Image (spheres, rainbow, N blue to C red):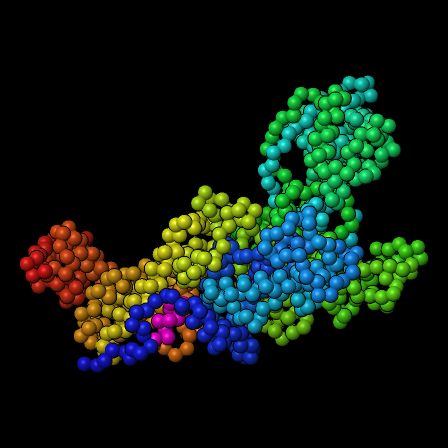
Amino acid sequence: MTSAIPGPAIPERPALEGLEQKWSADWEQAGVYRFDRAAALEAGRAALYSIDTPPPTASGSLHIGHVFSYTHMDLAARFQRMRGKHLFYPMGWDDNGLPTERRVQNYYGVRCDPSLPYVADFTPPHHGDGSGKPADQVPVSRRNFIELCERLTEEDEVQFEDLWRALGLSVDWSLTYRTIGAEAQRAAQRGFLRNLARGEAYQADAPSLWDVTFRSAVAQAELEDRDQPGAYHRVAFHAADGSPVFIETTRPELLPACVALVAHPDDERYQALFGTTVTTPLFGVEVPVVAHHLAQQDKGSGIAMICTWGDLTDVIWWRELDLPARAVIGLDGRLVAEAPAAELFTDAGRAVYAELAGKTVFSAKQRIVELLGEAGELEGAPKPIQHPVKFYEKGDRPLEIVSTRQWYISNGARDEALRDRLIEAGRAIGFHPEHMRVRYENWVGGLTGDWLISRQRFFGVPIPVWYPLDAAGEALREQPIVPGEHLLPVDPASDPAPGYDEAQRGQPNGFVGELDIMDTWATSSLTPQIAGGWETDPELFGLVFPYSLRSQGQDIIRTWLFSTVLRAQLEHHEVPWADAGISGFIVDPDRKKMSKSKGNVVTPGALLQEHGSDAVRYWAASSRLGTDAAFDPQNPKTMKIGRRLAIKVLNAAKFVYSFPGEPGAVTAPLDVDMLAELAVVVREATHAYDQYDHARALEVTEQFFWTFCDDYLELVKERAYAGDASAVTALRTALDVLLRLLAPVISFATEEVWSWTHEGSIHTAAWPVLDAEAPRGLLPAVSAALIGIRRAKTDAKASQKTPVRSATIAGPAILAEAADDLRAVGRIAQLSFTGADEIAITAIDLDESAA
């Protein structure tokens, strides 16, 4: 009899604990996931799989939703690597933008004041200890503030990387980039300059959605509606004959900004008023009554006031009806000191406005409602309502609309040909799941304005332009000065304009630098270019672009996915990737999306420690792309199932490797049929992964694995203990295949088991291929018979070890081919079979005296 596989490498008691640290370090040291550029170039593009990895926002902490979607991406990466592809799989950090600045303000207790000088070796008031209030934040120079942003994001990025390594993401960490790094700034500024040169980037004075907390403009893609309490106020305007004309508004504080009343052109109630004027209450300004099809006859009184600007519909009316602009809300969210067109107010109106100036929107609304009531211009009590209000997705105060000069990039909203190109580009991308394509197309079709990319903040990629000053020191903004691409990256706030020296900054006939930075998406939309070395490494870029996969969440289809497609179309005239894998949301037990704003976010660190990374990966892999997954941290059932699977892999492998014997031919009918069934599983799992259906691949693999452990292993163990070559070879072959099928999901346990008997990593081993004839149905038939024998013993309240004097099994004739294995596992002395379509134990005689 031959011996078992040598065992020094096999632990006496295999355990999951410590595998993450052990194998993460080993993978890094051995360069298991390192991109081999030379080999990839030699193999050619067809042998490459490149991933446009989402750079997570490096401010605060990752949450369970990140783990969910990034695991989905990693499953595809690991599968493709085992299929023999060379993986280009970088990681980026999205470390610029409003969320980072806000975190720095709160963490260090500072706020940026660009007028202040730089202080060397500045020490902030506190370091994330919760002390201090926003009102106590210390003003610091722009340079000091940016240094603090860089310091904190670097600390956050170290923690994020540690978590990703613990989760087992198989990225090449040597390819890591930062969206605030020099290469990213160079790419973003180059892209902008080329947009500008082609006429795709432009400046305009226009009504802009404005976040008064962040003091910055906000793009359409960053909006979200939140239901907020409000009230309709029935306010009286007065016609020329003195008769009241009642409007109903939720924003009476905008009365001083009113420029017209509007009703639907078919509304018979107001036909006589069209073309006339009415007088505003309190301020006494004559405004025209106009007609427009967007006015809703069945809303309120059917006639509304147009203010510049209360909402986006006001903007449409203002633009299409060519009305004047009289904005009264400032960039700080308070009513401005001097109202536009205040000369049109009555003396009493000017006195009213003087009282309102400087008040917040909330306070101004309260006071103006009081004044309307006192003047008898308010009919009835306000009617409370709940209505959707526009917010910046990361903000906590309603947006206002103010007039500002901003930079835009054409996105198809006003260019039908470009819009059609973007729709066609979307159709050239494989969306997984397919229905997510509709969200992209709906977004493109519903665009109402070009992409506003400028932000009035500090930590981000500077917009690379300066403006000449005339002899009077006025900026000539229609004549921007741009740098050559060889000078990038530049910071116009600190670098002099080309052809000028720093002494000419702000001086007549000198220059002034653009102070705005780019929206974070204006950089993130170029992640394929940044990671791939666009224009700096043509060889690499030509190899990896267009990428194979973009993996991301469904909530950023309108932002990251769309903007990346847009930039690729404008610059390269092609799609940025072949496929887009879209993950669903994580929802809480009440089916509400988990988000920081709702306060129901679960951070993954504790889950990884408690359940193990393989269990968390299993939980993520169990959900199909595009499907929302409910998660209850108090009852993480699926993670517990995943942990049980990983433990079973360790123990089952140790058991299989304990059998003596050398490899030989697989001849026993049950062994042959088991491998045939496994070959079907391999084909189904492979097809599922090819279709980005990792959940199906896991489902068929796991189902077979438990049949293998619970049924087949029990059925053949007596033969295996005896060193039967067919059983031992079939067991080892099946285990070898199952380990590779499970490797993308339970990456640590499978690597551990693989190391017991193989050189090298399982994650660079070949994806399994099993050539076998079609299964004959013997394994499922014998499994069903085994279940029947077990049930019969259980029903008799006997131990499973109880011997059986005799048993008769009804079923197909094929069962007889595994008679010896059934006798052994059931401890059956005499076994007979009768023909039947359904498998059943028709007679059994237990020998309980010998149990």
Q: Which residues are magenta?
A: 748-756
Image coordinates for residue 318, horizontal then vertical, percent: 76, 38
Image coordinates for residue 848, horizontal then vertical, percent: 8, 57
Q: Quadrant of the N terminus?
A: bottom left
Residue most extreme to the right: 471
Residue 485 showing in the rendered view: yes
Residue 292 showing in the rendered view: no
Residue most extreme to the bottom: 2
Q: Residue at x 71, y 34 (%)?
A: 363
* Number of numbered discs: 0
Image coordinates for residue 437, horizontal then vertical, percent: 55, 52
- Nearest the eye: 58 or 679: 58
Q: Residue at x 82, y 62 (%)?
A: 481
**In the image: residue 327, left or right of residue 51:** right
Q: Quadrant of residue 22?
A: bottom left
Q: Quadrant of the C terminus?
A: bottom left
- Nearest the eye: 725 or 531: 531
Q: Residue at x 51, y 71 (%)?
A: 87
- Nearest the eye: 573 or 5: 5
Q: Residue at x 77, y 38 (%)?
A: 358
On whether residue 322 falls in the magenta region, the answer is no
**In the image: residue 408, left or right of residue 674:** right
**In the image: residue 347, left or right of residue 536:** right
Q: Quadrant of residue 10?
A: bottom left
Characterize the magenta stretch by its predominant secondary structure. helix
* Image position of 633 with respect to 240: above or below: below
- Nearest the eye: 642 or 135: 135
* Image position of 337 with respect to 849: above or below: above
